[in-house]
């Protein structure tokens, strides 16, 4: 394949604009997820074959600006500048045009070939928003394409226009700011012409006036005189406007976005409130919104419980017959015992974990794609402030119900280090899908669904208490909630399926080998007769304090790898997944409590280590393990009074 037939494009835009839907449509199965070099931020890449062209597609992180306030923003702008893709697709939410245009203006300042993708144009029309595409093109001097990504409308035009753009020499035309600002930009741009930097001179000039720390540092090293001149020009702007020059530039950019929006948007008057408007008004209501939220999340967990129990019981029948066949035809040797422990570990993994994890992720991504997750953040903002963080933290909590690892990583959406650390600590005690396996598969199935619900309510209460304590220990005030409120839209099935598969892939690829190895090791230890010694060493905690079978000490150690291994290996070791035959209700609830709150899984620990340092990570692990053991022991004694 010649270079003439290869094209590289990147997708850039704010969150909730349909970037993922467009990426999945373009790349289909030809995509893979990794991490940026030296970062824990996801890197989504894919390949598209079209009209004899090989097109590499990169989905940049969803960001709201191109400053240096976050790793995602630095990654995005550095990639566009240094890698020089053939085209940048700026995905814009047509229903929130003015807000999106602020980012668009910053993107155009990088002087890369850009195509504006006006996505969700159908939702804009329903809201009475009519956008003049031709006028938009003439103002920004770049192609503009209207799309409906959820239905694939206009997406082929994007690729056709990209190919045309590659063959055409781009003539960049800049959008102009006010007279005083443009005068300062021109003065700096002229002097920057002689400085050998990989960035466009006009863009560097704007960044110097914004006091961008990275750019100021680079320019100061190259030419201190220009950096000094920038300081004087910043002071000049501040004297005229009475604000910091960074605020002056941001305000001017916002004003320019507003001016463009007024020129290209026509609002159809006397429009009746749409279903989306009425639904939004109800779901964000301070009173009704909470009842709806509790109803939706409650229905979500009851659906997971019902489906998980139904699916698990069907698998139990199939696997039991296979177990009988194995005992009859293979025999009972040491090798067959080890072989069966490996097979039984896989069967137990499938039977106990997948029935609960699969529906959870599907429902979670449906709610996210629908647009309801932002409403939960809005409703929970006041309560989150009581814990020293703001409403965005609720998004991390909900993601944490699926997996604590992405839940901890998503804490980057919080504005300050203090809020990121508090949120991460709280996420680690959110019952993830692996813990849900224990809650649903053990307590819910054998003790009762209301006991399982009670454990979730107890966990939420504990999160609030720990958050309140953390807000007192880590001094500072939470910032106000600033986040977009996307319109409701029909969930895109393909996007949901791909997101669910990506979430399950780690479970399938990583958990299975760990489960098999753990099952064989446990069985080998048992066959060699070491189990009593290890169990005896841990029995003061497991037996005397927690009232659990001695074997659970070993299982809790392996549970650090993945929490669901506790239940999976317990079934493999005891030779049955009918836990009511071997555990009392008190033991089931106690085991669930200690599993919920003791040391996070090794994947979560590694994220905490990388994000906040090894000292904080180990301190969190120690405190949570000690707290879980003490708490579970107390609950065990209270349960003895009930059962």
Image (cartoon, rainbow, N blue to C red):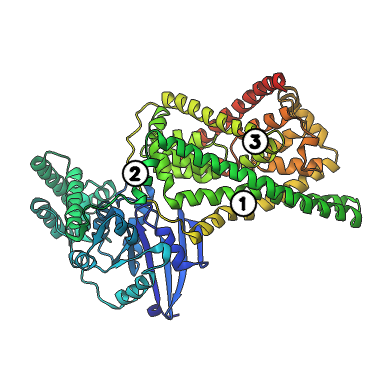
Q: Residues within 10 Å of mark 3 (few under 14, many from 20)?
A: some
In the displayed structure image, the side of residue 324 where residue 598 appears, left or right = left
Q: In terms of depth relative to the viewer, which is nearer, 578 or 525?
A: 578
- Whether pointer 1 and pointer 3 mark residues with C-beta atoms closer than 8 Å, the reply is no
Which residue is denoted by mark 2 in the rendering?
Answer: 483
In front: label 1 or label 3: 3
Q: Quadrant of the N terminus?
A: bottom left
Viewed as shown, does residue 498 lie left or right of 67? Answer: right
Q: Earlier in the sequence, mark 1 or mark 2?
A: 2
Q: Residue furthest top?
A: 641
Residue drawn 72% across and 21% down?
640
Could you say which disc has been placed on residue 449 in the image?
3
Looking at the rendered structure, the secondary structure element under dot 2 is: loop
Distance from the alpha carbon under mark 1 to that under mark 3: 25 Å
Residue 467 in view, yes or no: yes
Q: Secondary structure at mark 3?
A: helix
Nearest to viewer (mark 3 / mark 2): 3
Q: Residue at x 50, y 44 (%)?
A: 399
Relative to 56, residue 408 above or below: above
Residue holding disc 1: 507
Q: Quadrant of residue 7?
A: bottom left
């Amino acid at each position: 394949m010649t270079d003439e037939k290869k094209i590289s494009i990147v997708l850039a835009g704010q969150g909730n604009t349909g970037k993922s839907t467009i990426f999945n449509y373009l790349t289909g199965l030809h995509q893979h997820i990794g991490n940026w070099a030296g970062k824990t931020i996801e890197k989504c890449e894919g390949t598209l074959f079209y009209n004899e062209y090989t097109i590499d597609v990169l989905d940049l992180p969803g960001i709201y600006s191109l400053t240096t306030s976050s790793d995602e923003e630095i990654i995005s702008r550095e990639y566009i500048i240094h890698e020089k893709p053939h085209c940048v697709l700026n995905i814009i939410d047509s229903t929130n045009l003015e807000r999106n245009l602020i980012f668009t203006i910053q993107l155009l300042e990088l002087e890369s070939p850009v195509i504006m993708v006006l996505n969700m144009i159908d939702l804009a029309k329903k809201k009475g928003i009519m956008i003049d595409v031709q006028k938009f093109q003439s103002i920004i001097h770049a192609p503009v394409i209207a799309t409906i990504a959820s239905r694939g409308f206009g997406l082929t035009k994007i690729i056709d226009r990209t190919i045309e753009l590659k063959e055409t020499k781009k003539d960049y035309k800049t959008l102009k700011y006010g007279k005083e600002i443009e005068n300062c930009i021109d003065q700096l741009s002229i002097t920057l012409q002689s400085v050998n930097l990989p960035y466009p001179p006009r863009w560097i000039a704007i960044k110097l006036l914004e006091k961008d720390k990275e750019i100021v540092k680079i320019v100061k090293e190259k030419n201190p005189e220009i950096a000094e001149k920038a300081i004087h020009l910043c002071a000049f702007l501040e004297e005229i406007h009475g604000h910091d020059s960074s605020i002056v530039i941001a305000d001017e950019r916002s004003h320019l976005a507003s001016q463009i929006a007024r020129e290209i948007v026509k609002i159809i008057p006397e429009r009746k409130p749409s279903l989306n408007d009425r639904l939004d008004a109800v779901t964000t209501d301070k009173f009704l919104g909470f009842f709806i939220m509790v109803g939706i999340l409650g229905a979500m967990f009851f659906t997971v419980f019902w489906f998980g129990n139904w699916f698990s019981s069907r698998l139990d029948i199939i696997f039991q017959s296979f177990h009988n066949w194995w005992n009859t035809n293979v025999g009972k040797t040491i090798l067959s015992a080890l072989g069966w422990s490996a097979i039984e570990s896989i069967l137990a993994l499938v039977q106990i974990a997948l029935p609960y994890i699969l529906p959870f992720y599907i429902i979670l991504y449906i709610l996210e794609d629908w647009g309801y997750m932002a409403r939960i953040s809005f409703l929970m903002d006041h309560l989150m402030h009581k814990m020293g963080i703001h409403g965005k933290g609720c998004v991390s909590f909900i993601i944490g119900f699926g997996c604590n690892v992405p839940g901890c990583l998503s804490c980057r959406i919080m504005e300050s280090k203090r809020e990121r650390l508090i949120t991460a600590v709280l996420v680690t005690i959110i019952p993830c899908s692996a813990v849900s396996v224990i809650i649903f598969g053990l307590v819910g199935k054998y003790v009762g669904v209301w006991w399982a619900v009670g454990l979730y309510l107890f966990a939420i209460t504990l999160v609030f208490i720990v958050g309140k304590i953390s807000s007192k220990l880590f001094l500072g005030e939470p910032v106000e909630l600033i986040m977009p409120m996307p319109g409701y839209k029909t969930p895109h099935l393909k996007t949901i399926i791909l997101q669910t598969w990506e979430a399950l892939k780690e479970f399938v690829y990583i958990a299975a080998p760990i489960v098999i190895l753990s099952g064989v090791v446990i069985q080998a230890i048992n066959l060699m007769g070491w189990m009593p010694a290890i169990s005896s060493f841990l029995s003061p905690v497991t037996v005397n304090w927690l009232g659990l079978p001695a074997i659970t000490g070993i299982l809790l150690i392996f549970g650090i790898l993945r929490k669901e291994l506790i239940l999976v290996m317990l079934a493999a070791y005891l030779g049955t997944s009918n836990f009511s035959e071997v555990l009392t209700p008190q033991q089931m609830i106690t085991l669930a409590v200690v599993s919920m709150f003791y040391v996070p899984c090794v994947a979560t620990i590694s994220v905490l280590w990388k994000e906040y340092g090894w000292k904080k990570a180990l301190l969190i692990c120690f405190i949570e393990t000690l707290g879980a053991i003490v708490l579970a022991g107390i609950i065990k004694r209270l349960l003895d009074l009930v059962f």
